[in-house]
Image: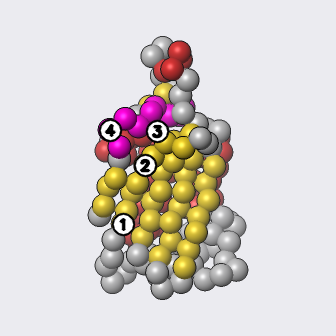
Amino acid sequence: MEQLFPPNLPLVRADRDKPKQALWNLCKNTAEAMPQGGTLTIKAYRSDAGVVLEIGDTGIGVAPGIDVFEPFTTTKSSGSGLGPVVVRQIVAAHGGNLTHTSEPGKGTTFRLILPQAALEYAASSGMYHDLMRLYQDM
């Protein structure tokens, strides 16, 4: 597993539990996409759109034409096909966006973007969290 978190990553606007569930779901899905082993990469950075978290794998990838965000769609032999759907709902409820790219035989990367916390509210509200700490607390 590779983890790339810059030391100056800004806080994100999010409650504590739901984003943790989203991260756990994405990490679980990517790990399961590598039945023969591989590399799970978690990378975070700041962009104009907010704080970006990329969770990628070197697994089997998703075939073209398969919408992983369609309920009950799965490429695995087991599973409900709801993981990415739930993650997208959590991210959207926090004002963010979730997309993915995939190449069959090479892997998949999910890209989660959450809004950066406004500095004047970050200190006084319980709705702003350090993305790295949320990840470490999973």
Image disc number at residue 44: 2
- Count neighbours of disc 2 (C-alpha within 10 A) and say few if under 14, some if 14 to 19, many if 20 or more: many
Q: Amino acid at mark 3?
A: Asp
Using the image, determine if residue 105 lies above or below residue 21. below
Where is residue 2 shown, x and y percent of the image? 30, 61
Calculate the distance from the C-alpha at mark 1 to the C-alpha at mark 3: 22 Å
Position of residue 116 in the picture relative to residue 129 (left or right): right
Q: Earlier in the sequence, mark 1 or mark 3?
A: 3
Q: Earlier in the sequence, mark 4 or mark 1?
A: 4
- Residue 30: name its quadrant: bottom left
Viewer-nearest of discs 3 and 4: 4
Considering depth in this image, is 44 or 89 the residue closer to the camera? 44
Q: Evaluate if marks 1 and 2 touch, with contact meaning CB atoms under 8 Å apart.
A: no
Asked which secondary structure carries label 3, the reply is: helix
Calculate the distance from the C-alpha at mark 4 to the C-alpha at mark 1: 20 Å
For label 1, the residue is 40
For label 4, the residue is 7
- Count neighbours of disc 1 (C-alpha within 10 A) and say few if under 14, some if 14 to 19, many if 20 or more: many
For label 3, the residue is 17
Q: Is residue 18 visible?
A: no
Q: Is residue 61 visible?
A: yes
Q: Which residues are magenta?
A: 6-16
Q: Quadrant of the N terminus?
A: bottom left
Q: Amino acid at mark 4?
A: Pro
